[in-house]
Amino acid sequence: MSSPLDGLTIAGIRKGLEERKFSATELATETLRHAREENPKTNAYLHFCPERALEAARRVDERIAQGEDPGPLAGVPVAVKDVIVTRGVRTTCGSRLLENYIPPYDATAVARLEQAGGMILGKANCDEFAMGSSNENSAFGPVRNPVAPDRVPGGSSGGSAAVVAQGTALVSLGSDTGGSIRQPASFCGVTGVTPTYGRVSRYGLAAFASSLDHIGPFARTVADAATLLQVIAGRDEMDSTSAAAPVEDYGKALTGDVRGMKIGLPKEYFSGLASETGGLIQSAAECLQRLGCEIMEVSLPHTQYAIAAYYIICTAEASSNLARYDGVRYTSRSTSSGTLSEMYRNTRGEGFGSECKRRIMLGTYVLSHGYYDAYYLKAQKVRSLIAGDFHKAFEKVDALITPVSPFPAFKLGEKLADPLEMYLSDIYTITGDLAGIPCMSVPCGKTAEGLPVGMQILTRHFDEAGMFRLAHAYEQAAR
Amino acid sequence: MKITEEQVRYVADLANLRLSNEEIARMARDLDEILTHMEKLNELDTDNVEPMAQVLFETGETATLRADKEKTPLSNQEALACAPLAGGGYFKVPKVIER
């Protein structure tokens, strides 16, 4: 079924508004209607917030009527992953524990995108507290991949990727701790960006693993993803880990000219890969070569240790961060409890899903007395080695390209029985998070079965402009 | 590596997490498999490697302190709005101290 967003981009919406082809209110109303009709096919939205969307639309229409600048996201329908808080709009984190949580404040990224004229239609489904690679860990049911409904959309930001692929939002916000933006973007055939650690404020993002968490955009085009990042990036006094480094003008990087850029293919990322995926990445590399890039092989020798290091660090941090869900302040509370201690235990035992419990247990174990040095400290040292691999590679090249996932979207239920197998599928995405460098997934074709495949681009800290330059040039050439 | 159900019970206690007997059995198997994979890190000699606790990058001054300005905090009513049990302007919990 056709979407009111078909053929539209952020710039296209702006033009339509200025030429009075439609109003922001009409676009919000039509997109909401379409999204409500289509949503049962994927379960990508958990809930809608029409009043908030229409209020945002009214402000945009008013500004345009008065001849004022309506902002860089004027009239753009947006979905927000449900781990990012929205004042007055239910924010569940995909968890039973927060089923009825109505936050009293807005995340900084949410406030910024609304100030820029964006219209939030609703909250996107995700794995519980962003823990998962398939969106099957949501307490409110899995999301189906809009491209292939018997398959997962990826995770944990599965809903945020699906709404963009489905045309029920133009762009969306997701979060990425170990691939949770790039992997679903690749599975659903859209663009997803994990910016440099600290580039976007995490104020209002439910904390999972604080040394790894990022907020980032999903979009259909590189230009739209860049525009959304431009709006939400930058220092925020509410998040002391947000970086003060100036935000470049990403739009200026989208020239199509990548002549002379040096690009590395890390050899460790091309073994144990589905052959179709490998072939598509090779073709993309050849395309970049034709555009004037210099392609060379590089080595990131500690890649094979990344899964172990990542799952020690992220579960350790998660076990601490998730301690706050205790039945006292904002979560639901178990009703079968006599003492305070029983109340904590029962609330958490009844409220958390199995993946969250597994990660809390792993994290508590690796931090427990006698194991801290053997696991947590060791993993932090290995993290240094992995980050060092990237620093060395970037002495030789300007960007790296790799697959996003070893295989395209898998079937619902296929990997649920074996948690380690699910963790191992994150191999190509978690390294970028461990190093804190910017990385993104850009569509690079489909398998014979019609399943989308994404190419990952990684660049130096704060070189989002270089990453967008390359992604945009490839996108235009591959059209 | 062999994780016993007794170890799982001990860690669940540390984590304030009630697990059923079935969950404990499954957890012992899962943790065992995952922790065995993590032993791979022991292949690496990291004696002279600094641990990386945070992402560090070269950038201009990152002010970690904000201006000491008065701001309206979240109101008591807003803070309690989602509490499972509140009363008299406080969060209420089961009795902690027995007389």
Image (cartoon, rainbow, N blue to C red):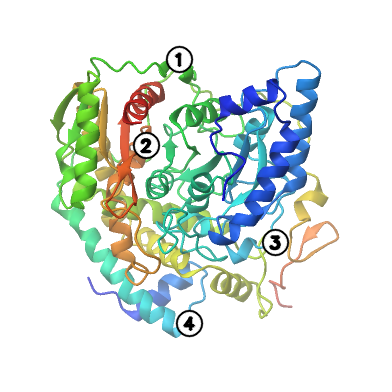
Three-letter code, disc 2? Val
Secondary structure at badge 4 equals loop
Provide the chain ID for the residue under circle 2: A
Does the CB distance between marks 1 and 4 fall below 8 Å? no
Residue under pointer 2: A442
In the image, residue B70 above or below residue A279? above
Q: Which residue is depicted at the point 40% across and 79% down?
A: B24
Can you give x and y, in whole percent of width and height, for residue A113 in the image?
A: 63, 32
Q: Which marked residue is nearer to the observer: mark 4 or mark 2?
A: 2
Q: CA distance from mark 3 to mark 4?
A: 25 Å
Give the secondary structure at mark 2.
strand
Task: Tell which subunit mark 3 falls on.
Answer: A
Which mark, by number, is residue B20?
4
Rate crowding at label 4 as few (under 14), some (14 to 19) or many (20 or more) other CA atoms within 10 Å: few
Left or right: residue A112 versus residue A437 is right
The residue where tag 1 is placed is A252
Given contact means CB atoms under 8 Å apart, are the residues at marks 4 and 2 in contact?
A: no
> Crowding at label 3, few (<14), some or many (≥20) Cα neighbours within 10 Å?
some
